[in-house]
Amino acid sequence: MSWNTDEWVPDDRDAPPLDEEPPYDEYRGAFAEAGTGGRPVPAVAPSRYATPAEALRTVFGYDEFRGQQQAVIDRVVAGGDAVVLMPTGGGKSLCYQIPSLVREGTGVVVSPLIALMQDQVDALTAVGVRAAFLNSTQDSGQRAAVERAYVSGELDILYVAPERLASESTKRFLERGTVALFAIDEAHCVSQWGHDFRPDYLALSELAERWPGVPRIALTATATEATHRELTSRLRLEAAEHFVADFDRPNIQYRIVPKVDVRRQLLDFITGEHAGDAGIVYALSRNSVERVAEFLSSNGLTALPYHAGMEAPVRARTQARFLREEGVIVVATIAFGMGIDKPDVRFVAHVDLPKSVEGYYQETGRAGRDGLPSTAWLAYGLQDVVQQRRMIDDSPGDLAHRRRLTQHLDAMLALCETVQCRRVNLLGYFGQRSEPCGNCDTCITPPESWDGTVPAQKLLSTVVRLQRERGQRFGAGHLIDILRGKRTARVDQHGHDALATWGIGADLSESQWRGVARQLIAQELLKPEGEYGVLGLTPESARVLSGDRTVVLRTEPERPERSSRSSSRSVASADLAVEDQPLFEALRSWRAGQAREQGVPAYIVFGDATLRAVAAARPATMSALDGITGIGAKKREAYGEALLEVVAGASGG
């Protein structure tokens, strides 16, 4: 899928270049005269930690690595290249952050969205990492200060956008310092097969030639086998070691419901199951984003719109509120979410059908990064399928491009219409086998299937009679009116009550017929055509009409799902002992104050998982804070005494 610039926040494409030849004497301790014929050479950022385990414990406050993290880190520390496929929340960032602290030099991280670099740098600075970024949001003085720090060997990690790294001036600037490694985040963006193709990623293949001795690590949470192969080839990482983690996110419950009154359904879902929680709602159009956000706001929720048609300062304020305030819901196009590190997003909802399973997986993966129970909720209906098919037919590009889009959509429809475990289907798309999860809607309430051959024949026959006998084509709504014998102005105008199929489908309700039509389109037995989405036949339609093909359909529910779960307890405290919950809430309140005072998101101070661990352990001394997850040396020094005061106060000490 080609890159749609309208769906991305501003990048560094038009950023001012770095200074070509900055005065060397401005760099504090940057150079040493060492056999270079008088030309200064850059200082090298020394290794700050002897081993990855030491960096993990001292900086990040964790005692052990998860999954394949250690194997990836060991590979990169030793100078080898790596391709890492790991789900959101699986700890990808540590795979390049820790090698940047252990290897000499500065780790250069290619990050696709400049709007998030500040928060990424803030989070690293909070734990004692010397991090900075270079992007077009900075003035010349700020950029010069970062340049001096890099060349002086005073940075552990430097973030840049792919657009900036593609410029020759940036490459020459990096050559004046020492690069410890290149980390290419969101590496699927280099693949034209993938859903987020960005042309500037193609230039990153030059890194192998320009810095042949510097290890490169490409990371993504979203890649099919085809995308995996393509990103490996385009980034020239054929000799890299590949690490493919389990894509499963067991804490996320996947639910897909028929779309009836989607805004009301969404409101019921949020108020019934996630009242007061932070969440993201995705819609495909700006108009839909605005209407959904307004509806939720009018019903008492803090819901903010976000799309590429809004002014940049407004988008920035929305993103800041989402990161820094509790319980904010952002209604957005796909322009929102990539790279956001907020760990306590409790739900991700889609009110329109996503264009691909890759996009759906990546977007839903923004929920529950802290490992706590979260929900991925999607409502879709007949019009979604019609609209997507029409968009593919009208899309620019060659036949191969449209075929790729069709394959993406077919996989998404298969996920929506499956009667088997959603998670098995989802992981299977990424080439991983799994067993039924017991934590998706099809596992919790197994759907029924039925032989829909006869209804399919009735609907297809109606299309045939209209086209062949009268030269007419209509959309699903009118076809259903004919089948159900519903008298309308259009029926009377065209005399469609005289058709042989008039009224032969009265045994099914309108919603059931819409389900039949939707599933026939999904199975490519009907095809939307033209601007108005009228329905036509496909090559397979004849086999159904002749009885040579059986049509199995998913049973449609009689009425839309109503949320029944409601709880006044936050998900974050759900597994805490009753006696520890007041302390946990006191710690959250303290954290909120610290975050406001510093102007940073609450999770940069401490994540919920750390506060839960403190509430359960009730430490009374500074030494008792050692070993509590998420409390490294810098945070213990910065917040240790305050934490102990909160614990003592809640304990009556």
Image (cartoon, rainbow, N blue to C red):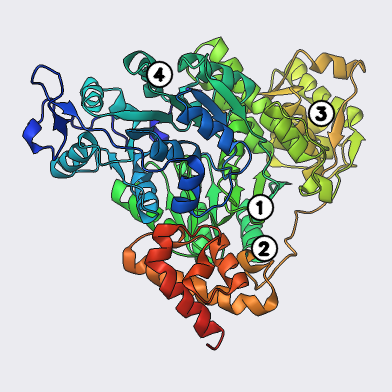
Q: CA distance from mark 2 to mark 4?
A: 43 Å
Residue type at mark 1 is: Thr
Q: x, y (%) of residue 585?
A: 55, 75
Residue type at mark 2 is: Glu
Q: Nearer the viewer, mark 2 or mark 4?
A: 4
Secondary structure of the residue carrying tag 3 is helix
Q: Which mark is residue 375?
A: 1
Q: In the rendered view, tell whether residue 115 sits above or below residue 191.
A: below
Q: Which residue is mark 2?
A: 273
Q: Is residue 569 left or right of residue 483?
A: left
**Decide: marks 2, 1 in contact (CB < 8 A)?**
yes
**Decide: marks 3, 2 in contact (CB < 8 A)?**
no
Q: CA distance from mark 2 to mark 1?
A: 9 Å
Mark 2 or mark 1: name the one nearer the start of the chain: 2
Q: Which residue is mark 4?
A: 202
Residue type at mark 3 is: Leu
Q: Residue at x 51, y 25 (%)?
A: 82
Mark 3 or mark 1: name the one nearer the start of the chain: 1
Q: CA distance from mark 4 to mark 3?
A: 47 Å
Q: Is residue 522 left or right of residue 361?
A: right
Badge 2: residue crowd in 10 Å (few <14, some 14–19, many ≥20): some
Q: CA distance from mark 1 to mark 4?
A: 35 Å
